[in-house]
Structures are given as C-alpha cells and as structure tokens.
Image (tube, helix red, strand yellow):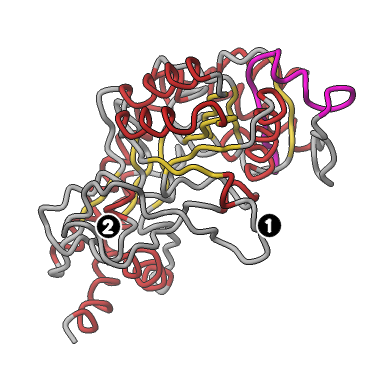
Amino acid sequence: MEVADLLCSRTGAEKARFTSSGSLATMYAVLLARAFTGRELVMKVGGGWHGAQPWGLVGVEFHEKVPRDARGRRAEEPAFRQPESLGLPSSVSGQVVVTRFNDPGMLAEQMRRHGKHVACFIVEPFLGSAGSIPATREFLTAARELTRSHGAVLIFDEVISGFRFCAGSLSRLLGVQPDLATFAKVMGGGMPVAAVAGRADIMRLAGRGGGVKFSGGTYCCHPSSLLASKTMMGWLAEHEAEVYPRINALGGQARRAVEEALASEGIPARCTGDGNEAVPGCSMGSVNFPYDPATPCTTPEQVKNPAVCDVELADVVLQLALLLEDVHVMHGLGAVSFAHTSEDIARLAEAVRRAARRIRPFLEC
C-alpha cells in the first residue's frame, strides 16, 4: 500500500497493481484495456518494444528490405508488421495495428480506419530499443485526443522512462495523462518489481471479482522488491533536484564523447537521445551508423532500417568490441546513473577509441 500510494502520487494515477516484470505489466495493461472496451485491436508504433508478450511481439523489427527512399523517410505503411517470434497464435498479428512514431497525421488516419475496433494505443513516451527517441508533445497530445474521441484506452509504456527523467512519470513533464501506464526498471532499484497504474474505473477490473486475471507470478509483490521500490522511489523524490540535472548532463557528455571517439578513428556516428521541446535532457542514448551522414536518425524507420543505418555494427559489433575493453553497453551506449562520474565518461571514450581501432580494418574490407 505504501508503494502504491507513492507511485500514484508521483504519476497522477488513481490505482496501482504490481507484478514482477515490464513484459507482464504491459500484457496486463492490454488485457485491462481489451476487457474495459470490449474490443480486440491493439495499436502500437513500429519499432516500439513492449516486452515478450503476445501483442508486444508484433511490429518490433524492420522487415522491409528496400526503403522508399535512401534516408528511410515516410512510406505509406510502416515496415514493422510481422510477428517477431515463432509459436505465437496466428490471430495475434491481425489484432495489432502498427502506426508511425511522432506522426500525428498517420495516427489520425489509422484511428479513422480502425478506431471503433481499437481497445488501446500503447506507446513509449521515450523509445528505448528503437533508437532512444523522445516523443513530441504534439504526437502524444494527438494520441490523447484521438483515443478519447474513439473510446480507446491510452497506455504509456514507462518501463524505461518512468523515474528516468524525473521522480515520477515522463507524462508529468509532457503534460499528457494516459489512462494506464506501466512501470518497472528504475522504480525497483534493480529488484524484480513492475506496476500497472491508472484510472480507477479501469483498474477495478484487475484481480478477484474484476474479471481480468491479474494475479500470480512467483515473485509478484515480493516484500524485498517492494521495500527496494519504496526506498528507491522515495530517495529519488527527495533528491529530485539534485539527481536529474546531473545524470542528464552526464548523458549529454557520454553521447558527445562516443561520437567524437568514433570520429577520431574515422568512423562517423550519430548518437540519439537528446531531448526536445518537452524533454529538457536525457541520461540515455543509442549509437547509430547512418550510411549517409545527412540522415537525421529521428525515427525507427531510419535507425532500425539496415538499408539506412548499419544496425549490426551498432547492436552487435560495437557491443562485443567494447566488452573486450571491459565496458558493457546496450545499443552502443545505454544509460548513465547517479553513480557515474565524468571520469567514467572519459574511460568510456577511450574504450570506444580502442574498440573502433579493432573494428575499422574490417569496415574497410
């Protein structure tokens, strides 16, 4: 109860319920939305990752071999439609509608075509594995208006962004309140805890008597995890003014240091993760290797498209080369924490230089 009260007070939610992983949280959020609306379709953005659950395993990886133009700019439909895993029911792919991130016009068109059947639109306010790209306020405001007018549930997947940009939800900074939101990762301080939080009338469907089987899980609501969550969220709320400016500044230093280190060895790269008009700073980042230096790397259709960016170099080769330098990264960079220092960023830069020297001879073959 103490953790639920703290989570709701920091996110604007009315009720919260706990589970043990982000994948389960997004699955339960979709189940709640489908039960609440009596509809089947789930809308998401191409490239968005919502965990290893059925509706999350559609529209994640780029599947179109040849993009419409050399920079991966707009096509009529996103190239993220196939299921991402064997073993899924054949009906799942037909239950997912994929739209384009930060494209209010396409979202409006998809809602016009499918809205009366859409149970929910689930979206990350800050794309994680699809390129460390923040949503625009315009896009999320449109999502709020369109879901409301079509009777669909708006779900923000804040498994990554929750408590990463402020001591609460990123939606708080954006000024857009979803109907449901999912949280994990930072809120648990490294322990297995996750949550679905949102409107009371939807959350009443969870658990005993509500109809949605929101229960089970070996470590669900484990006392150690909840103690860690209470400690972590409480500490971040108390030290919010100190923590977030510092880690955002370190994130900016890390992105620039990685770009400069790769450039010094003759490998041009572009780090994503910088903020926008709604997100003032960011402690995360991804490394991209566009073939055309003019490519802005602002959409999943660009950063996930192997015809536009060298995806293998960013997600596999650079990561393995940095492991040989005793540095572990995700998507070429990852996230900095309050424990990191400027000295750590300098060490990262030197490790990237050494990794680039390993890599470059093979790029020239």
Residue type at the position of mark 2: Asn
Quarter of the rendering containing residue 323: bottom left
Please give the name of the residue rendered at 64% of the width and 52% of the height, measured from the top-left corner: 91
Q: Is residue 154 left or right of residue 191?
A: left
Where is residue 80 shown, x and y percent of the image?
Answer: 42, 54
Please provide the residue range marked out in magenta.
192-211
Where is residue 342 shown, x and y percent of the image?
Answer: 31, 45
Q: In the current view of this chain or complex, which residue is farthest to the right?
A: 209
The one nearer the camera, 286 or 251, is 286
Q: Distance between the residues labelled 2 and 1?
A: 34 Å
**Disc 2: CA contacts within 10 A as few (<14), some (14-19) or many (>=20):** many
Please give the name of the residue rendered at 17% of the width and 57% of the height, measured from the top-left corner: 69
The one nearer the camera, 143 or 176, is 143
Q: Is residue 207 left or right of residue 173?
A: right
Badge 1 marks a residue whose secondary structure is loop
Residue 197: say if magenta: yes
**Is 56 above or below relative to 64?**
above
First in sequence: mark 2 vs mark 1:
1
Task: Determine if residue 351 is in view.
Answer: no
Please give the name of the residue rendered at 11% of the width and 57% of the height, measured from the top-left corner: 293
Q: Name the residue under label 1.
A: 89
**Disc 1: CA contacts within 10 A as few (<14), some (14-19) or many (>=20):** few
Residue 169: say if magenta: no
**Is 156 above or below relative to 259?**
above
- The dot on residue 288 is 2
Badge 2 marks a residue whose secondary structure is strand
Please give the name of the residue rendered at 32% of the width and 29% of the height, measured from the top-left corner: 104
Q: Is residue 311 left or right of residue 149?
A: left
Marks 2 & 1, CB-CB < 8 Å contact = no
Q: Quadrant of the N terminus?
A: top right
Q: Is residue 177 left or right of residue 350?
A: right
Residue type at the position of mark 1: Pro
